[in-house]
Amino acid sequence: MIESLRCSRSIPLDTVELLDDVDDIPPGWRDLFSALAQAGVRISAHPSRPRGARNSDLGRLQRHLYVGTREPLVGDGSLAVVRARTSLDASEVIAEWLAAGPRDRRGTVVIAPSDALSLIDVAVARRGMPTFADSKRAAQRGALHVLPALVATLWRPLDVDAVLRFLQLPCSPLPKRVARVLADSLAREPGLGGPVWGDAWDLLKREEAAAPSGSGNRGALAWREWIDFARFDRYPGIPRDEVVAICGMVGNWALPNGDTTGSRREAAEMAAALTAAVSVLDRTHLSASLIERMAVAAASGAATPSRQAEASHDRAVPLPGALWARAGTVVWWHRSTTLSPSDTSPWTPDERALLEAVGCRMPDSVAERRRAARQTLQAVFNAGRRLVLVEVVIDAGEDGGSHAVRALATPLFQDAPIEFDATSALRSERSILAGHDIVRVREPTRRLAEARDCWTVPLGLASVIERRVESATTLDDLARCPLRWLLGRVAGLKPSGDRVAPATERLIGDLAHAVASSCFEAGKVPDPRSVRVSAQAALDRLVVEIAAPLRLPEATAALAFAAARIPSSMESLARILADRGATVLGTEIDRNGAFGHVDVRGRIDMVVSQACGALAIIDLKWTTAPGFRRDEISSGRAVQLATYRQLLVAGGNVHAGYYLIRQEKLIGADDLSLATEHVSANGSLDETWRSVASDRAAVLAAAWSGGHVAAASDAFRGSERAASRRGDQRSPCRFCNLRVICRVPKE
Ligand code: SF4
């Protein structure tokens, strides 16, 4: 354009008025205006002068900034500073004030960043007023997530949480059911290749085969392309052609027929923009950090399709520089004040240096600051009737939430009667802001529900309980707290939020179980040293398949510890079994049985035959709190061992104990001859089983009769045995996320 201006003889343009000083604008624009001036266009400065009434606080502020006068402010309502603890408080008060309806409100301009404006929009809409809807740049909306989320899943080692985020996008290339099945399986066993992942795909294929034709299923293979692909090292990164192919996938999904509107069109345009950007780069590979930043930058340029401004005399602008003519009332959020390069430039200092070295002229930071200051003054001068400055303390950075205008006129603002506390105004029935009454009606307060020890079981749950198949873990839950079992296991109440990969200790525990299962087969106990070698090999394979998060850099120490401890522990277990003449009968043995009203299914970690002829159940545990398992045995609360024993041979000559993998110890009651540490037990596993079965029967009876179940804090109604079994009654509450419902107080 500049070149063609230089060649033009005449331009149909007489004058251009600039809001900024021509020396302060970015170099490209400066060149353009200089070419226009050379072509005969008059370039002049837009006049900027105070527009408030002389005898008002607003006029006094404007004159102070314009000519330096210092007349005290009297608090006449034309100038106010609203101070709030949070943006939410501030937006409520501003909406309340706008709704309180200054009759001369026409032409109100709100200067606010888009996040604050979204809050104001919600608050004004609740009061039946039109929204501003200026939050026009929102990268995180609908289909716009897809490309950045997919890019985050491309790297080695696999980031399971990134894959889970991709699967749980609200607008996803995968059908909802497919994404849910895959996310469930990853959250259970985080890796692409383990048995649970394989089962998930088998299930999807079966469902696809059973689905009626034309039901919209595209086929498991097509879905798999989005998840199961070769991944790349973060550095040197992904080949450029692969990025182009991925952008093509996203584009084809977003615009299958080329006529989609809304956020999917935006997503397709974003993918095309990224393709264009990588195509001009002189690189064969793009590192993870580069392509992730490019994807986010492409997303941030996309418009929010669903936001529409509603008809109104009021307007909103994101920055003070956008207010270039007289406005009646100006409401101005403290964060909409700067244009500093560090806020707006996408380049790091090194990148700026590189760009400048190849002739790219970057904006000068001093000029940018001058420009920001000029725009701040201009916005103050353009307020005609009222200026309301909003300061939000919690959102503030180092400046403590101070408004830029306050910084320019500190002496004038000192002790001036213009401050308004928004947070306390929300608790008052009447307050006055900028000359207008804000009236609020107090809602009557209600008492919160109190903690209870007994809870009525809804009648409808009785048949659900009757049909349930329990496991050793769910029965353990029931024994610790019937209420938690009822809410979590029967009613299926789960914490809200997205699925995430399990915590590190759980992953190591699962890994140790899988390694043990691969090292021990039915028959003679293998040589302990060979068990260590095979455990090491199995661990390297299994960590990829079922515990992928352990390969991420942040889990390096945990994985190193597990990689040393698990093989060593398997060797110890083999030695314990071999030294005591035991024979392995099987690992991961599935059993089920019906015992009165209780149907139970379970998987027993290991069963061995002892030298004395009795069977022994070995339950593997990875724990940092071995005392907890000892207490279980000694107090007769080892419900899981009792359940496995019942499942294996009800009432037979079977002993049971825990093998603590981390501690390399086999603990059990005195009758377990294999144990390396004996714990004196208060009662037999048979008694424990009878007690938990009677708990289960009691809950079922309560459900049929509309009776009660106990919370953990209640001494269980029934046998003394059960009450003592619960032992430390409140301990289950310490890690229970249902506390908010049953309101057991914190210990
Ligand atoms: S907080 Fe305690 S009493 Fe309440 S459900 Fe959880 S374990 Fe039971």
Image: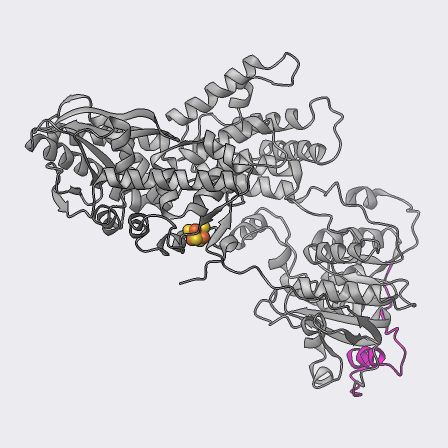
- Which image quarter holds the C terminus? bottom left
Q: Nearer the viewer, residue 47 or 620?
A: 620
Q: Position of residue 684 (x, y in %)?
A: 20, 41
Range drawn in magenta: 43-72
Q: Position of residue 609 (x, y in %)?
A: 14, 26
- Is residue 284 something one can see in this rendering? no
- Which image quarter holds the N terminus? top right
Q: Nearer the viewer, residue 175 or 264?
A: 175
Q: Position of residue 623 (x, y in %)?
A: 27, 46
Q: Quadrant of residue 73?
A: bottom right
Point 76% across, 80% down: residue: 418
Q: Nearer the viewer, residue 387 or 164?
A: 164
Point 39% across, 35% down: residue: 157
Q: Quadrant of residue 420?
A: bottom right
Q: Position of residue 625 (x, y in %)?
A: 26, 50
Q: How many marks?
A: 0
Is residue 61 toward the left or the right of residue 501 in the image? right
Q: Quadrant of residue 99?
A: bottom right
